[in-house]
Amino acid sequence: MMRVKSCDSMSEGSSLTSRNPLICFLYMSRARSTMLLAEELVGKCSNLALIAGIQTQGRGRYGRRWSSPRGGLWFSLLHDLKIDPSLLPFVGLAMAISVVECLKDFGIEAKIKWPNDVIVNDRKICGILIDSKILKNKTSHIIAGVGINVNFSSNILPVDLKDKTITLFDILGYKIDLISLLDALCICKKVTQALVLLVLV
């Protein structure tokens, strides 16, 4: 179980090592949105996890605002995965499975709410957003934006969100190491297997 180390020990622009050798972590203390930053990096780099301590313009489906205070795990994976566009929803599903599997390590039974949410006790703990561009009937790249409510109380959220939201801190009563959680998500065996199958389809 990943009890808290220092969640604020990372420096701006620091590169962190993942147990998944195919993914590099890049941390920023503040960003408009990791999705927006990933979009700017398309064609320049890939296989990268962009992490923000705070997002000032975090967004969900249909451009909805996503509250992203310090203490959450806000990141986007930029990958050069080339698949049939019809399979894109399954990339989001694979990411959701990864979150559900990792939460089991804390004794938390989470559920997937199609198409892009993970919930606990009917309250949202994670949202996932998938974006891509199509080139010659295949995706040229995929950006998977993930927001997980981790080391803060849902009581700090805006009034219209707090009753619909739950955090790991609400459930566990203690903080966990964010990078260890992200690393666990990136090496989740079920996700790796699912993505391999998508490429083979």
Image (tube, helix red, strand yellow):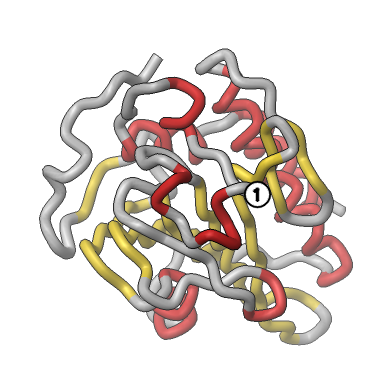
**Left or right, 149 with reference to 45:** right
Residue at 63% across / 26% down in the picture?
A: 101
Residue at 32% across / 46% down in the picture?
A: 71
39 vs 182: above or below = below
**Circle 1 is placed at which residue position?**
164
Q: Nearer the viewer, residue 44 or 25?
A: 25
112 vs 2: above or below = below
Q: Quadrant of residue 12?
A: bottom left
Q: Nearer the viewer, residue 85 or 30?
A: 30
Q: Nearer the viewer, residue 171 or 52?
A: 171
**Residue 92: x %, y % from top left:** 71, 54
Q: Amino acid at mark 1?
A: Lys
**Residue 130: x %, y % from top left:** 66, 66
Specify few, some or many for label 1: CA neighbours under 10 Å numbering under 14, 14-19, or 20 or more: some
Whether residue 59 appears in this view of the structure is yes
Q: Nearer the viewer, residue 63 or 50?
A: 63
Residue at 48% across / 61% down in the picture?
A: 158
Q: Quadrant of residue 4?
A: top left
Kind of element beneath mark 1 = loop
**Residue 44: x %, y % from top left:** 39, 80
Residue at 28% across / 57% down in the picture?
A: 53
